[in-house]
Image (tube, rainbow, N blue to C red):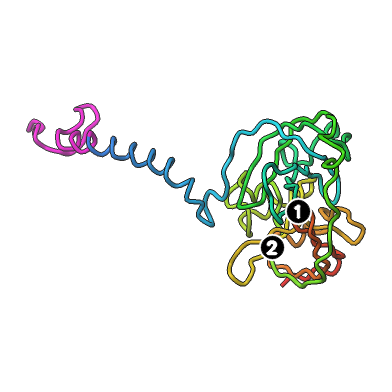
Amino acid sequence: MSSLDPQDEFFIGYLGVPPRLKRFLLGFIPILVLSVLAFAFILPPLHFDHFNLGKRTKVPEFEGLLVGEPSPHLLVPRTGEVGTASDFSLYLLSGTGKTSPKPKVLEHVNQWVKLKGTPFHRNHLTVIATKSAEPMEPPTPESAQPAESSSLGEFSLTGEIVDGKCYPGVMKPGRTKTHRSCAIRCLSGGVPPVFVVHNQVGDKLYFLLSDLDGKAVNDKVLDLVADPVQITGEVIQYADAFVLKADPATYKLL
């Protein structure tokens, strides 16, 4: 019976790792680890359209006016010189799960509050996963209320209905058919629906959806999520956002 050749590179567990394979692993494993770390730090800031669509930051507390319709949101006064822009920024509100904010938060609707939560951003769309809110005194009488909303007319727009929590960055990609089931669960739980539209130069426009009475449309759009949809209705400028007011029964699946 012949003995095993120690120079044979064939791997046998009980004989240890062959020298050439060992040298290869000692070089390959550090490169693999460094590559993974590089992807972890380099890719997120790139914000590819189908990968890492948002970023998560830590801003624990906001002060603003809590509004309940068409979907829960916070109107936060802008600081500094705003020029012709709105004096208020609109932040959508959700719960910490696939829900609307807790009843203990929503009981302060139409009041100024100190609101704690985790914000998620995508372009100029922001949602706060709300943890708590407590009433506060309005800053001054002049700035206690935002300017009235204004109608921009009737438009027919084509886009996609997404849930306003996953799309800004909680989930990836947060849109299209791969995210349909999650979006339906979020909208069913009270997360604000958002209509995403690409204009002629490729910019993304975001619209809050409301019915003709200014109410939420969550339960009326579940079978239209993640598909191209055409909505014809009144576009309203509201703070630094848009509201698309239309009868959900007239939404057209394309």
Q: Which residues are magenta?
A: 1-26
* Quarter of the C terminus within the rendering: bottom right
Tag 2 secondary structure: strand
- Cα–Cα gap, marks 1 and 2: 10 Å
Q: Residue at x 80, y 62 (%)?
A: 244
Q: Are marks 1 and 2 in contact (CB under 8 Å)?
A: no
Q: Residue at x 58, y 47 (%)?
A: 54
Q: Nearer the viewer, residue 249 or 114?
A: 114
15 vs 163, left or right, is left
The disc labelled 1 sits on which kind of residue? Pro
Q: Is residue 17 magenta?
A: yes
Q: Nearer the viewer, residue 177 or 8?
A: 177
Tag 1 secondary structure: strand
Res 136 quadrant in image? top right
Residue annotated with mark 2: 160
Q: Is residue 125 above or below residue 152?
A: above
Q: Position of residue 31 (x, y in %)?
A: 28, 39
What label does residue 193 carry, if any?
A: 1
162 vs 123, left or right, is right
